[in-house]
Amino acid sequence: MFQLRRNALKPILVAAALIAALACTTVTSQAADPLPSWNDGPAKWSIVSFVEKVTKPGSPDFVPVPERIATFDNDGTLWCEQPVPVQLYFALDRVKALAPLHPEWTTKEPFASLLKGDVQTALAGGDRALLEVIMATHAGMTTAEFEQIVKDWIATAKHPKTGQLFTDMVYQPMLEVLSYLRASGFKNFIVSGGGIEFMRPWAERAYGIPPEQVVGSSIRTKFEMRDGKPVLVRMPDLNFNDDKADKPVGINQHIGRRPIAAFGNSRGDQEMLEYTEGGNGARFELLVLHDDGAREYAYGPALGLPEPKLGAFTQALYDEAKKEGWTVASMKNDWGQVFPFEPSPVTAIDILLEPDATMLRHAEAANASLRKIFPKGFALDAAHRPHMTMIQRFVRTADLDKVYDAAGKAFAGANISEMKLEAVKYYYAPNNDLGVPGIAARPTPELLKLQENLIAAVAPFTVQSGASAAFVTTPDDRVIDPALIEYVSRFVPNNSGDRFNPHVSVGVGPRSYLDRLLAEPFEPFTFSPAGAAVFQLGQFGTAAKKLREFDLKP
């Protein structure tokens, strides 16, 4: 239910973060950065330039939305594939679980090595050994049973080096590419040598790519009736190996359109990029080069990097990429951040006032009315705390304690508990047929002075911008909307002083209802701040995590 609501309301909730801008005159600013985890340079610029030219109406390179197809390899392109691909760890655990039923495995390779935890020796058997393990551990059950086995395993399985969940070993810069393309009308597909039914159970939560947009290797399935119910049974026979020259075959079979953009990282992706390049019109190809042994792994053997057992980026592939004009993205030089879980040097904060019982009563009544009209809207709860934003800034994480001290002194000098504020009207931020309404307060001289003092107090600790890691994110929504990042970056010049629009957001509703609400008389009321705090911002500009609360007693 929450997933449905979150996807359906994302543009509206982003509008909630921008609601204060309604009271502001237009201020020229640079477009929001869609790839904040990418360092500025040719790799980042090549992605943005391609997207802009194929999505701009009237451009000679314009591509209609139905033809905007992008394909992504998975292992090593979207998530970490070393020291061995994730699916091999799954197979290893399946071997251990099934071993009591197969005593012969204790002396039979590659099973004997896997049971000893010696994955490298098992890999020495090559493709034949891998296929034997896959058939023994991935077949003999229905597709529904296998899906549940995968879901149960991926929920707790962790990377042996970092101790992080495998689903947290995704690449933040590539998540941003997926989000950027999706927002630009592209349809993203995974095209991987990994098992199609291994990836489908979790790909949507990890990448926002639904099961029907996953292309991969498969084993044969057979229709059967079991206990009077129709099922598909997984058989121990290879159906399709979606790798190398067969990747374009899989694309043709499953997608039916030639992609205009393709992303990979190894020799196994070469033909997919060649197939993409062979189409008419503007095309884009990118290879991820793993050259960062400090933050992830360094392997090639291109450019003299170590050669891995699986996932090789050969020198011949590198030379072809340079010859054909493909983008080669260096993990070391082009990615400012690799994984979502990396500590961020920057934190996005909201310094706010928490309203008293009078304002809460009015806000909750308005929210209840909205939810009767529009049940899918959000409730005022821990995830959507009623508050009045004073400033939003990006600050250095290492300076957070100094930010708290500085903000605390500004609050202490304002005698906030004695402030009397007047709520004067409803208004809303429109977004298509819906809107985000708020109760607006009159900006008093005392409130404006407090905002001015807060801006000055935290100024020494601020930075211009940040990436998604500066915010509170969730595993199924790791990429912060670029418009929100831009909004926080521009908050002070755009939303302070005579541009300040103090308000408390109260929900989401249809514009037809909100227009009637605004036409009705509003009875002004007086309220006071009951608290003050610093929160870390989350998706949609919510006050997601309380970092520090201040005592307002004189």
Image (tube, rainbow, N blue to C red):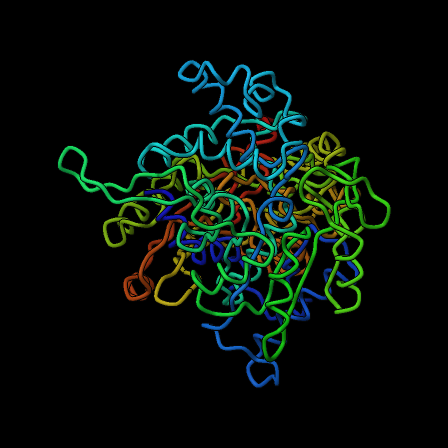
Q: Is the N terminus in the top left, top right, bottom left or bottom right quadrant?
A: top left
Measuring 39% from the left and 57% from the top, which residue is drawn there?
426
In this rendering, the answer to whether 431 lies above or below 154 is: below
* Total number of numbered discs in the rendering: 0
Residue 128 visible (yes or no): yes
Q: Position of residue 322 (x, y in %)?
A: 79, 64
Could you say which quadrant of the image residue 498 lies in? bottom right
Camera-nearest residue between 451 and 369: 369
Relative to 487, 297 lies left or right? right
Relative to 409, 508 lies left or right? left
Measuring 60% from the left and 68% from the top, which residue is drawn there?
276
Q: Position of residue 202 (x, y in %)?
A: 45, 41
Camera-nearest residue between 241 and 363: 241
Could you say which quadrant of the image residue 80 lies in? top right
Q: Position of residue 419 (x, y in %)?
A: 53, 40
In this rendering, the answer to whether 20 lies above or below 463 is: below
Q: Position of residue 203 (x, y in %)?
A: 47, 45
Residue at far left of view: 228
Relative to 23, 408 lies left or right? right
Q: Is the C terminus in the top left, top right, bottom left or bottom right quadrant?
A: top right
In this rendering, the answer to whether 93 lies above or below 382 is: above
Residue 388 visible (yes or no): no
Camera-nearest residue between 505 and 149: 149
